[in-house]
Image (tube, helix red, strand yellow):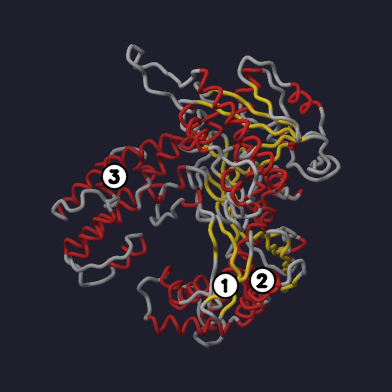
Amino acid sequence: MQDANLPVENQAAEVPSASPHCPLITASAAQHVLHRDYETRSTLDLQNVGPWKYASGDYTEVWCCAYAVDDQPVRLWRPGDPVPLEFMQAAADPSWLLCAHNAPFEIAIEHFIMQRRYGWPKIPLQRQRCTMAAALALALPSKLELIAEALELLHRKDKAGQRLMLLMSKPRRPRKGEDPKGIYWFDDEDRLQRLGRYCCDDLESEREAYQQLRPLSPEEQQLWLLDLRINTRGFHIDRELAVAARTIAEAAAPELDVELAQLTAGAVTSINQVARLKVWLAQQGCIADTLGKAAVEHLLATDNLSAAVRRALEVRQSGAQAAAKKIDALLSRCDRDSRIRGALRYHGASTGRWAGNGVQPQNLKRPQIEDVDAAIAVIATGDYSHVRSLYPKPLAVIGDISRSMISAPPGHQLIGADFSSIESRVLAWISDEEWKLDSYRRFDATHDPRDEPYCITACKIFRVLDGTFDAKSPERKVGKTCDLAFGYQGGLNAWRKFEPDRFSDAEVEQFKLEWRAAHPQIKKFWYAIDRATWQAVRQREHVIRCGRLLLKCTGMFLFIKLPSGRKLAYPFPRIEIEDLEHEVVVFKDASSGQWRDCRGGNGAYGGLWTENIVSAISRDLLAAALIRIERAGYRVVLHVHDEVICQTPIGFGSTEEFTRLMIVSPSWAHGLPIAAKAWCGSRFCKS
C-alpha cells in the first residue's frame, strides 16, 4: 500500500498522539521555530494538479527560499547556495518546530526537490506547523493577505510582488528566434532580485501571523497530521474508466448544444448559457429564477409547457448533470500511480468540517440508476453511440458512476462506512429531545421499519400512534423532509429546497407547526443558544453555560466550547440593533470566500447557531472515528461528509469490525446513540 515516493516518513506507523511515546511539541515548549517560504516555477498549474503532483513534476523548480529562525533576520537561499545551517540544526534538534503557511506545499517541495536535488535534511512531520490551519480553526480567512488584513498585521501582501511571482511561476512565450517548442522563463537578474524581496516580505507576514494566531490544540494538531497523511496517501481511481467517460461526455455536449440551438432558433447555443436560456424561457411564458437541478425538475412537473420549452428544459437537465468537468479535475490531478492526492481541505468550513480541494469529492453524485455495474461496463467502452442507444441521458449516467471511478488497485479492496442520520441524532442529543433519542435507540436495536425515527416523527406530526407508519408509508417522506427542513428553525423556504412542488404552502406551514410541537426541546434550544451567545458577547470574559456547551467572548473571538473540548470560533463579535427592535450578534465570516459580516435577525439566529453546533459535533465524531480506524490498521484514503473510506489488502479486516470501530462512543458523547453500516468492494459504493 505504501508508495516510497510519498513525502511521509512511515505511512504504516501509528497516528501521532500526545502520548509519552510520541509527544507533540507545543509552541511554548519549542526551543526554536524555523519559518520558511518557497517560490517556484513549473509547466504544471498548481491549482489544477495539486501540491503533490506539482512538486513531483519534471519541470518544477525552486526559484528561492526565504527563511528565518524566531525573530532573527530573514535570509534568502537560491539554488547553488549551500544548505542553510538552520535547517541542519532543525533536523538534528527534536525540540525545533518548522512553520509555513499552507505547510503541505512546503513539505511536498522539500520532499521532491530540496532533499533530492539539494541535499536538504528530512524533518519529521510531527514537528511541522501550519499558519493556514491555525487561521482556519479560528474561522479566519485562509489566504495570507486576508489574514493580515483581519489581524491588522504590520506586514501586508505586496500586490506588485504577487503579480511578479505569478508571472515567473509559469513559462513565458518563446521570443523571435527561439525554438517554439522550448521552455523559457522570466529569469533576468532584476526580476530574480525583486522576487527574492517579495519572498522575504511574505515570510515576514507569515511569521507575524504565527505569532498572533492561537496554535492548534494538541488534539487538533494530531488530527491535522493525520489529514496530511491521508492527503499524501491519496485515493486510487480507475483511469481507463475516467478517460472513457470523458470521451463520451465530449461527444454528448456538442450534440446537446446543437439541439438546444435548434429549439431556440439560435437564441441559446450552449447548455451552459443559463442567462440566455432564462430569457428565452421567459419569452415563451416560462419564468425561472434559477435553472439548477431542483428548479428544472419543478418546472418539468408542470403540465402547461409547450413541447419546445419542455425539451429545452430536458436538454438543460441532461447537461447540468454532466460530470465532464469533474472528470477533467480527476484526470488532471491524477498522479503516475493513478492516485489523487490533496483532495481534502482541513477545516474547510468554520465548523471544522472538511471541504474539497480541486476534485471536490463531497459533491460526487449519488447514483440514481439501479444497476451501476451494468452502466460502468457500457461507459467503459467509450462508444457514445452505444451508450446513447442504451441510456437516453448519457451525461446523467456518467454522473451516476462518478463515485465508482474511485477504485481499489490490484490486490486491494475498499472498505467504508457512514454514520446513520448523525446530524438528526446529534440535534436531539444536544437539545435533550429524549423521545427522539429513544426512537433511535429502539430502531438501532430492532431495525423494525415502524421504529424508524422518520416514521415516528411522521406519527407525531399526523397525531397517530407510534408504529402506525413504516418505510413504505408515504407519510415517512413527510417525516424525513420535516426533520431536514425544520431542524434548524427553517420554514417554507427550507422545505422547498427538498420538496419544490409537493404540498401547498398552507400544508407546509402546518407541518412546521406540528413538527415544532413534537420537538419542544429542540425549539427551546434554539432560543437558549441564541440568548447565550448574546449574553456571552454582552458580558465579555464571563463563561455562559447552555446545556452541554460553554460560551465565552474573549479577545477578538466568541468561543463556543463543544462537548469534545474543541472550540468553535466567531471572529470580531458585536451586538447590533436590527429593525430598531431586535438585538443580534454579528461576527466576521470567511465561508463565502470573502471577509464580511454575518448577521441574522428576527429571532432566526438560533437556527444558525444550532446548525453550526450540530455540524461541529458531527465532525468531531468523524474525527474520533478516523483516528480509531487508523490505529486499528485500516488506511484511510478518503472521507466524504460522514463516511470513511479505507484501502486495505484483500482479506484484511471485515465490515463487522469496521462498523464497531465507527460507532464507538467517545467519553464526551455519553447518551448519544451512534449507528453505522459498512460496505466492502472494489469500487466506492454506498452501503
Taking the view exactly as shown, the residue that stands out farthest to the top is 177
Q: Earlier in the sequence, mark 2 or mark 3?
A: 3
Q: Please, is residue 180 above or below residue 534 in the view?
A: above
In the rendered structure, which amino acid carries the disc numbered 3? Answer: Val
The residue carrying pointer 1 sits among few (fewer than 14), some (14 to 19) or many (20 or more) residues within 10 Å by Cα, namely many
Q: Secondary structure at mark 1?
A: helix
- Residue at point 64%, 64% (across, down): 573
Q: Please, is residue 128 above or below residue 279 in the view?
A: above
| 532 left or right, relative to 310 | right
Q: Which residue is mark 2?
A: 533
Q: Earlier in the sequence, mark 1 or mark 3?
A: 3
In the rendered structure, which amino acid carries the disc numbered 2? Answer: Thr
Disc 2 and disc 1 in contact, CB within 8 angstroms: yes
Distance between the alpha carbons at the discs numbered 2 and 3 = 56 Å
Q: Secondary structure at mark 3?
A: helix
Q: Please, is residue 398 above or below residue 618 in the view?
A: above
Give the percent coordinates (x, y) of residue 289. 31, 65
Q: Earlier in the sequence, mark 2 or mark 1?
A: 2
Give the percent coordinates (x, y) of residue 477. 46, 73
Q: Which mark is residue 387?
A: 3
**Viewport quadrant of the N terminus:** top right
